[in-house]
Image (spheres, rainbow, N blue to C red):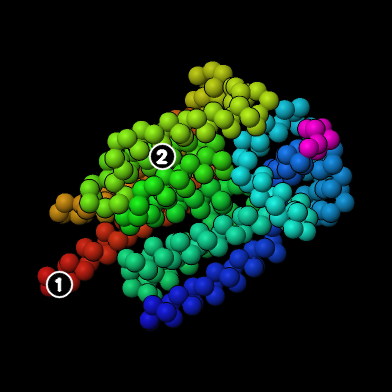
């Protein structure tokens, strides 16, 4: 199969899949509060925004989840929007698409669908640089059909957009793109989800310690330090400007006591054991233990960074949501597949 044919086939597949998913939205429980936050950004008070959203749900959403949404709205805490205002870029996109004539419900979903498409295309570009066209097509299509990817496209959340920025950043790092634009993407990701601070800090460190010193990815000490400082400032500004209480995160139940924290850890590992992560860890261990020469340092550094992000997120947020993990799944597994493919090619040449 030629590269052009594979590109056309995957593009067609991705368009059809995105359109199909657009017709089966998930209407997740957070959707009304993201809409309320968009109305809040447009000038309404918290209670006015929540009341307007309640009326909107009753009028526009006619399915089995309507009653659940209304119940969640009626029983929400007074400061519930604090959890959603810290994702300002996604909220601004909702406002933008609503201003273009889409309903609030559709406007909350469109960023996820666009991000899903761009995630798929980035996955294919990465795969096509490391594998034959037919293999790249197959790998990319399978990844986009996994549950974490499909869920991203169906939800009214910033998670797909967040995965897109993290995936593109790691793509740029791995293929030696200029560090400035990668760091800028990481800074923007902080306005999508504030907890991207963990990924941003570790990926900035990855660029600073990148083993291929001659590549444009390698970040000198001064810009590395400055971008870390900028990341801290951006997070503090988002927290200060968009929330009513700077220390809102103290309301998380699992930080109130060790007993509650460790109970949450047990729940985390229960979810972890049934997720794709366990399989990817097993495949990674198999590849590394069977690799008889020195593992390429770029692969080793990238995979180490991925697992560091997962581990540090676990320490601060012991709550497992597989939809957060797609970018890390892809960037953790694809270099391993590249490693296994290189081993097979080497063995074939020796024979």
Number of on-image labels: 2
Most prominent secondary structure in the magenta stretch?
helix
Q: Which residue is tagged 2?
A: 309
Q: Is residue 261 magenta?
A: no
Crowding at label 1, few (<14), some or many (≥20) Cα neighbours within 10 Å?
Answer: few
Query: Which label number is shown at residue 56?
Result: none
- Part of the protein shown in magenta: 43-50
Which percent across, then down, holds residue 46? Answer: 78, 32
Left or right of 128 on screen, residue 285: left
Which percent across, then down, holds residue 52? Answer: 84, 41
Q: Nearer the viewer, mark 1 or mark 2?
A: 2
Q: Residue at x 15, y 54 (%)?
A: 292
Residue farthest top in this picture? 257
Left or right of 241 on screen, residue 128: left
Q: Residue at x 70, y 52 (%)?
A: 96
Give the alpha-carbon distance from disc 1 to disc 2, as whole Å. Answer: 37 Å
Q: Nearer the viewer, residue 90 or 58?
A: 90
Task: Determine if residue 301 is in view.
Answer: no
Which percent across, then down, holds residue 142? Answer: 47, 65
Mark 1 and mark 2 in contact? Answer it, CB < 8 Å: no
Q: Which residue is tagged 1?
A: 349
Q: Secondary structure at mark 1?
A: helix
Residue farthest left in this picture? 350
Q: Residue at x 36, y 48 (%)?
A: 179
Mark positioned earlier in the residue sequence (1 or 2): 2
Q: Secondary structure at mark 2?
A: helix
Q: Nearer the viewer, residue 58 or 79?
A: 79
Task: Determine if residue 140 is in view.
Answer: yes
Left or right of 346 on screen, residue 57: right
């Amino acid at each position: 199969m030629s590269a052009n044919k594979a590109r056309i086939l995957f593009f067609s597949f991705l368009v059809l899949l995105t359109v199909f998913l657009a017709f089966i939205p998930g209407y997740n429980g957070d959707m009304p509060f993201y809409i309320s936050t968009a109305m809040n950004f447009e000038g309404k008070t918290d209670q006015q925004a929540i009341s307007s959203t309640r009326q909107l749900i009753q009028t526009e959403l006619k399915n089995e989840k309507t009653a659940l949404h209304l119940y969640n709205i009626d029983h929400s805490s007074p400061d519930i929007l604090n959890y959603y205002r810290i994702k300002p870029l996604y909220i601004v996109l909702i406002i933008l698409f609503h201003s273009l004539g889409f309903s609030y419900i559709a406007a909350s979903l469109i960023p996820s669908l666009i991000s899903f498409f761009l995630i798929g295309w980035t996955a294919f570009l990465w795969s096509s640089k490391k594998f034959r066209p037919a293999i790249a097509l197959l790998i990319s299509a399978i990844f986009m059909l996994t549950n974490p990817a499909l869920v991203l496209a169906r939800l009214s959340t910033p998670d797909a957009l967040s995965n897109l920025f993290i995936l593109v950043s790691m793509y740029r790092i791995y293929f030696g793109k200029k560090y400035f634009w990668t760091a800028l993407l990481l800074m923007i990701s902080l306005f999508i989800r504030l907890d991207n601070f963990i990924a941003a800090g570790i990926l900035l460190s990855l660029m600073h310690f990148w083993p291929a010193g001659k590549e444009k990815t390698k970040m000198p000490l001064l810009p590395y330090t400055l971008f870390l400082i900028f990341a801290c400032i951006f997070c503090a500004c988002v927290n200060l400007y968009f929330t009513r209480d700077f220390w809102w995160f103290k309301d998380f139940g699992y930080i109130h006591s060790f007993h509650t924290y460790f109970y949450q850890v047990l729940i985390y590992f229960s979810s972890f054991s049934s997720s794709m992560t366990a399989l990817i860890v097993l495949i990674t261990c198999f590849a590394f233990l069977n690799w008889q020469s020195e593992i390429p340092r770029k692969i080793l550094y990238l995979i180490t960074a991925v697992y560091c992000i997962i581990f540090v997120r676990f320490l601060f947020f012991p709550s497992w949501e597989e939809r957060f993990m797609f970018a890390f799944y892809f960037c953790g597994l694809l270099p391993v597949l590249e490693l296994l493919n290189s081993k097979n090619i080497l063995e074939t040449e020796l024979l």
